[in-house]
Image (cartoon, helix red, strand yellow):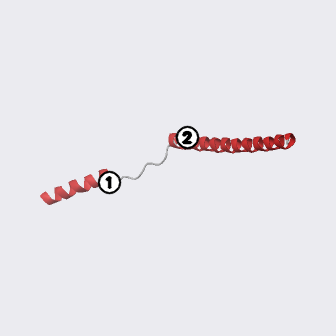
Amino acid sequence: MRTLYLSLLVSGVVLGCGGSKPQPEGPAEKAGEAVDDAARDVKDEAKDAAESTGDAAEKAGDKIEEKTD
């Protein structure tokens, strides 16, 4: 009888603590991921724009240098 109670207790602890499934993402988690993705996209676009601006400035500098030589 004691073994039966002990095995039921152990089973209850295992099912209660370790046997739970992960919770599905809720609206807040999904919204947070969307904000993170948007911020990452803006960052990437800003980096690309800065590189393009730097390239254009370098070309303009080269043209000025050619004219002044």
Q: Quadrant of residue 43?
A: top right
Q: Quadrant of residue 52?
A: top right
Mark 2, Cα crowd under 10 Å, few <14 / some 14-19 / many 20+, is few
Q: Is residue 69 left or right of residue 23?
A: right
Mark 1 or mark 2: whose residue is earlier in sequence: 1
Query: What's the amino acid at mark 1?
Result: Gly
Task: Kindly report the distance in space between the C-alpha atoms of the residues bearing marks 1 and 2.
Answer: 29 Å
Q: Look at the image and tell me whether residue 1 can be seen.
A: no
Q: Between residues 43 and 68, which one lies in front from this camera angle? A: 68
Q: Is residue 55 left or right of residue 8?
A: right
Task: Assign the C terminus to one quadrant of the image.
Answer: top right
Where residue 60 appears, as percent x and y from the top left, is 80, 41
Q: Between residues 63 and 11, which one lies in front from this camera angle? A: 63
Residue underneath mark 1: 18
Residue underneath mark 2: 31
Q: In the image as oriented, which residue stretches furthest toward the left?
A: 2
Where residue 15 appears, as percent x and y from the top left, is 30, 54
